[in-house]
Amino acid sequence: MPGSASAARRTSARSGRTVLRVFIADDSLGFGTLAAAWLEAYDDMEVVGTARSASEAIAALTAAAPDVVILDRLLPQPEHSEEVLAHVRAELPAAAVLLVSGMPDEDLAGEARTAGADGHVSKAANADALATAVRRVAAARRPG
């Protein structure tokens, strides 16, 4: 299925586990670089692309075919994040969207629901919390 995130999943030779393909769209070079390094350290995750703007993300997402998109809530404005989210829903309906922001977690939960994202995590999260959030939203989008 072209554009299907679930079709893009593959199995890791090292672990025999399903590998989640993750795309990071965040205008913060620091957060994007750190998040990518953290996630690449896990056997069940592969970062398949990054973008620092909505236009870069929209241009790259379909070809990257991620299972999960980590999306900055303010990329650099909420309407840009909404454009990316709309693109994911239209072109990659099986992909999960994990909203990230520097705002407190309880505020972000409401923002994520309002935006139509599958979940949220604060940028203050550590590597394990980020990886857990990625796995959680991916599992929630899987059929069956």
Image (cartoon, grey):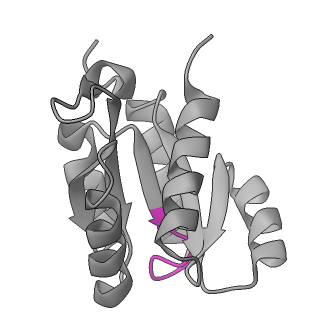
Relative image position of residue 46 (x, y in whole percent) = 25, 48
Task: Find out whether residue 30 is within the magenta segment.
Answer: no
Magenta residue span: 71-77
16 above or below 69?
above
Is residue 45 rendered to the left or right of residue 104?
A: left
Hey, which residue is sitting farthest front in the picture?
Answer: 15
Residue at image location 84% in from the left, 74% down from the top: 106
Residue at image location 47% in from the left, 63% down from the top: 71
Q: Which residue is nearer to you in this view: 61 or 13?
A: 13
Is residue 8 rendered to the left or right of residue 70?
A: left
Number of disc labels = 0
76 above or below 129?
below
133 above or below 142?
below
Of the 4 image quadrants, the one containing the N terminus is: top left
128 above or below 21?
below
Relative image position of residue 94 (x, y in whole percent) = 47, 27
- Please tell me whether the stretch drawn in magenta is mainly helix, strand or loop: loop
Residue at image location 61% in from the left, 86% down from the top: 102
Residue at image location 71% in from the left, 60% down from the top: 112
Looking at the rendering, which quadrant does residue 73 occupy?
bottom right
Looking at the rendering, which quadrant does residue 132 occupy?
bottom right
Of the 4 image quadrants, the one containing the C terminus is: top right
Is residue 56 rendered to the left or right of residue 17?
A: left
Looking at the rendering, which quadrant does residue 14 occupy?
top left
